[in-house]
């Protein structure tokens, strides 16, 4: 199995097509050559996720985290934990990823989303702000920032953040609906 970009794309295509058993088989061939290939472990985890086998997916993400010190497996594992509503664990995993690369805005955005679900708006606000300080083109971080600004009753700033998010994301029903909510709350 090719361990280059084509090989990874091939495995991704198998997962997308629902042929997760073949995807796992292909990944296992990659892992025979390089058992520390974090990209292969991430793909194996994604295949397990597609099968609904979250325990195996978490195990594969753990194996990916043992690789060459990239933050991606931490982000992916935290996103799965978040979907599983294991919020405290997700925060710990994101913090581990941030130790590797505190300059990646997607980690800060993901942490903000988890902290929002933990009803920690001040901490979430800080995370969305850090994501945007690193890259202000993250439209969904602007949306997260807007939601946290509503918690803080900073409605003018929340509305401006909604407008920025809409500019970057484009026409999105949930974002437009939230903007209307903020506008109504601001009006009275």
Image (cartoon, rainbow, N blue to C red):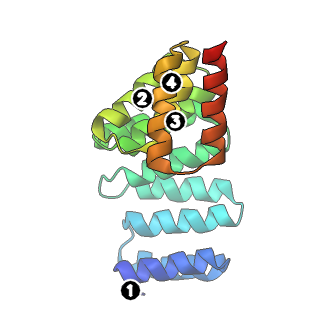
Residue count near mark 4 (Cα–Cα under 10 Å), binned few <14, some 14–19, many ≥20 = many
| Along the viewing direction, whichever of 57 and 110 lies nearer the viewer | 110
Name which of mark 4 and mark 1 comes first in the sequence.
1
- Residue at the location (51% across, 26% down)? 159
From the image, state whether disc 1 or disc 2 is nearer to you: 2
The residue singled out by tag 3 in the image is 143
The residue singled out by tag 1 in the image is 2
- Residue at the location (66% across, 80% down)? 19
| Along the viewing direction, whichever of 169 and 45 lies nearer the viewer | 169
Name which of mark 2 and mark 4 comes first in the sequence.
2
Residue count near mark 2 (Cα–Cα under 10 Å), binned few <14, some 14–19, many ≥20 = many
Residue count near mark 3 (Cα–Cα under 10 Å), binned few <14, some 14–19, many ≥20 = many
Name which of mark 1 and mark 2 comes first in the sequence.
1
Separation of residues labelled 2 and 4 (CA atoms): 16 Å
Residue 127 marker: 2
Residue 79 marker: none
Q: Pointer 3 and pointer 4: residues touching (CB < 8 Å)?
A: no
Q: Vertical placement of 69 versus 182: above or below?
A: below
The residue singled out by tag 4 in the image is 158
Instruction: Give the percent coordinates (x, y) of residue 112.
Output: 49, 32
Separation of residues labelled 1 and 2 (CA atoms): 38 Å
Residue count near mark 1 (Cα–Cα under 10 Å), binned few <14, some 14–19, many ≥20 = some
Res 91 visible: no
From the image, state whether disc 2 or disc 4 is nearer to you: 4
Separation of residues labelled 4 and 1 (CA atoms): 48 Å
Callout 2 secondary element: helix
């Amino acid at each position: 199995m090719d361990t280059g970009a084509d090989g990874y794309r091939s495995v991704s295509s198998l997962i997308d097509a629902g042929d997760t058993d073949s995807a796992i088989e292909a990944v296992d061939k990659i892992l025979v050559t390089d058992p520390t290939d974090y990209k292969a472990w991430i793909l194996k985890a994604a295949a397990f996720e597609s099968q609904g086998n979250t325990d195996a997916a978490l195990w594969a993400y753990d194996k990916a985290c043992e690789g060459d010190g990239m933050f991606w497996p931490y982000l992916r594992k935290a996103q799965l934990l978040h979907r599983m509503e294991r919020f405290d664990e997700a925060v710990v995993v994101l913090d581990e990823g941030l130790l590797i690369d505190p300059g990646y805005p997607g980690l800060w955005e993901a942490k903000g989303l988890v902290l929002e679900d933990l009803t920690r708006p001040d901490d979430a606000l800080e995370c969305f702000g850090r994501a945007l300080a690193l890259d202000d083109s993250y439209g969904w971080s602007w949306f997260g920032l807007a939601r946290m600004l509503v918690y803080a009753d900073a409605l003018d700033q929340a509305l401006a953040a909604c407008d920025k998010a809409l500019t970057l994301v484009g026409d999105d029903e949930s974002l437009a609906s939230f903007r209307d909510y903020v506008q109504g709350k601001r009006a009275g």
